[in-house]
Amino acid sequence: MKFLPIGREDMMQRGWEYVDFVLITGDAYVDHPSFGAAIIGRILEDQGYRVGILAQPNWHNADDFKRLGRPRYAFLITAGNMDSMVNHFTASKKRRKEDDYSPGKKAGLRPDRATITYTSRAREAFKDVPVIIGGLEASLRRLVHYDYWNDDIRRSILIDAKADYLVFGMAEMTMIQLARYLAENAPEDEIRKLPGVLYRTNELSHLDNCTIIPGYDDIKKDRRKFATAFRKQSDENDYLNGLPVVQHQGSSYVVQNPPPAPLSTAEMDWVYGLPYTRKSHPVYDPMGGVPALSEVQFSITTHRGCFGACSFCAIHFHQGHTIQSRSKESIVQEAIVLSKHPDFKGIIHDVGGPTANMYGLGCSTGGSERNGCKKESCLYPKPCPSLNTDHTPSLEVLEEIRKIPGIRKVFIRSGIRFDLMKEDDSQRYFSSLCEYHISGQLKVAPEHASKAVTDLMHKPEISVFSDFVREFRHMNEGMGKQQYIIPYFIASHPGSTLQDAVQLSEYMRDIQCFPEQVQDFTPTPGTLSTAMYYTEINPLTGESVYVPKSEEERSLQRALMQYYMPKNHDLVRKALKIAGRADLIGRDRKSLVPPAAEDDKKNKEKNQKKLKSTDPARKTFHPSGKKRGHR
C-alpha cells in the first residue's frame, strides 16, 4: 500500500505527468479512515482518478500550491477534521499552544479560517481551475452562521471563500458524481442538481420548488430572523422530503440542495475497506509523527450518524440522523488487519462511532426512511416507541472481535447513550460492557442537573443518569470490579442561570464527583445551541432563552463546577450570594465552600482530603475527566 503523492517525485515514481485532483487539507497527511481527506482521496483513487495530497501547505504565498502542478479537474479543499477556529482557540478565545493534527503537535501550521485562505491561494496558483470546498468547517458554515470568535454573523463560507461549489456532509457519493461531471465537462445545470451540493446563483427560475429563508441582510438587522432561518433549514435537512434551501447573500443567492441519501451497508463496507496505510506520512517521522493518529490507529469505526440530536452537537447535521452501519464481516476483517499490524499490542482502543451503542439501530417502522418522520431526536424527551433498541448487533460484533487471535482487550471509549442502553430490556449489552469493554473508565454525558437546561440540550433529565449510575455500580459490584464513570457536564450552556449552575454543583456534591477539568460551552457553527446563544431565542419554539454571555458569569458557572478547589472559593462565594444561595456557605456537609474567614490553611487541607473520600458513591466516579474536542 502506497501513500497518495505529495510531490513531483512521488508522481514520477507512478509515471504521472499530472494529477486530476489536488486535495488540500489543513491536517497533516494521515492515511487513515478517521481522516476525511484520506477517505476522499482513496475513494477517488478507487474510481480511477489521479489524486495528489497537499497537506498543511505554506499559505503565505501561492508557491506551495503549485507543488503538484495544475490539476486537470479541480482543487478539493478542507480545513481538516476540525473547524480551524475550534482547533486554534479555547472557549475563552485564548490561542491553543498545541495542535494534535500537526506533526509533533506543532501549532500554527494552518491559518485561521483555513478553507477561505487555502481557496484564495489555490486561485492565485491556477486561476482557471475549479475549487470545491468541503469537510467539517465548510459543511457547518454552509449558510449564514454565527461566528463566536468574531462575535458576529458571517455569510456562507462559499461566498467568503469564492469557491465554485461546496459539498456538505460526509460526501463520498456526491464527490464521485461531481468528479465524473467535471471529467465529462458536464453542463453546470447537471452539477447543480446533485444532492449534498451548495452553489451560488443570480436567479431562481431553474428551481420549481424551494424553501426561501431569511437572508444575510435581514439577519444582520434582526436576530429573530436567524432563528427563523435556522428552523427552516433544519426542517429541510432530510434526504427524502427536503427541498432546496435558498438564502439571499449580497448580490446573489446561495442554494443548498437536499442532503444525499445515507450510505448503504455495502457502501460503508467499501469506504472502510479501501487500502489505507493507516499511518501518518513518513515525512513526519523526524518530527515525532502526528499525535491524532495514536487515538484512532487501533480503533474501529462501526457506523456513522446520530439520532440523538443533542442541541450542542453538530454530528446529526453533518453526518445525518440515520445510522449508517458497516456489516459485521467488514468490521471483523478490519480487526484482523489491525491484529497483524507490527505495532499492535493486543488492544483495540475503541469500537464505535459518534455514539458507540447506536450501531445497527434505527426506526423499526420505516427503516432509514422513518416513514417521512421529521423529528430530529429519537431519544428526547423520551425514547421513541418506534425506535429499535435491541443491542444484539453490537454484542455480536464485539463477541466476534474478542475471538480473534492476538486481540487481548476490546474497549469502547467513544461514549455511550446511557438512556438508550437502559431501553434494552435484556441488559446483555450492559453486562457485556462492564465485563469486557471498559478500560476502567466509562465516558457518559449527562451534561447538566437542571431540567430547564437539559430540556434545551435535548438530553434526558438527571434522574435517568442517577438510575444508570446505581445500575452500573450494582453490576460492577456483582462482578467484583472497580470501574469508574467519567461524567461530562457543560458550564454556561444557553438556559443555564446561576441558580441552575448551583443546582449542578449540589448534584456533583451529592454524588461525590470532583472533575479536574470542566467543559465550557463553546458556540460552534451549525448547532441549535449556538443559534440560541446568538439569538437568545429557542428557534424551535420561539421562546426567549437566558444566555450567560459575560466572561464574569461564565467564570462563576465554571468555578461552581469545581467548587471544591480552594482557588475557586472566592468566585463560588460570590456566585452563591448572587444566586441567593448563601446558605451553601458554611461548615456543614451540605456546604459547598467555607466562610471567607475560615478559608485558611486548615480548611484547604480539609477540602483536599475530600478528593480521597472512601464514600461508596465516590468509588463510582473518576475525577480526571478530560475536556472533549469539537462535537
Image: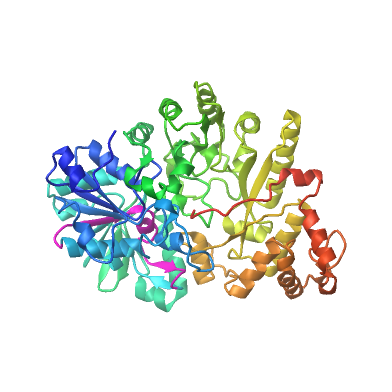
Please state the horizontal and vertical placement of residue 395, each as a whole percent of the image: 55, 28
Q: Is residue 455 left or right of residue 576?
A: left
User: In x, y percent, where is residue 208?
Assistant: 25, 57
Task: Give the residue displayed 21% in from the left and 43% down from the top.
Answer: 10
Q: Looking at the rendering, which quadrant does residue 70 occupy?
A: bottom left
Q: For residue 317: magenta?
A: no
Task: Give the camera-side residue of 294 and 571.
Answer: 294
Task: From the top left corner, tell me how far across and down residue 457 is, in percent.
Answer: 58, 57
Q: Is residue 31 above or below residue 404?
A: below
Q: Which of 441 and 370 lies nearest the eye of the viewer?
A: 441
Front-lying residue, 581 or 257? 581
Left or right of 591 on screen, residue 14: left
Residue 581 in the image: above or below residue 122 = below
Q: Relative to 487, is 326 on the left or the right?
A: left
Q: Give the magenta range.
A: 127-150
Q: Residue furthest front?
A: 286
Look at 68% across and 69% down and name the residue there.
498
**Left or right: 259 with respect to 503?**
left
Outermost bottom residue: 221
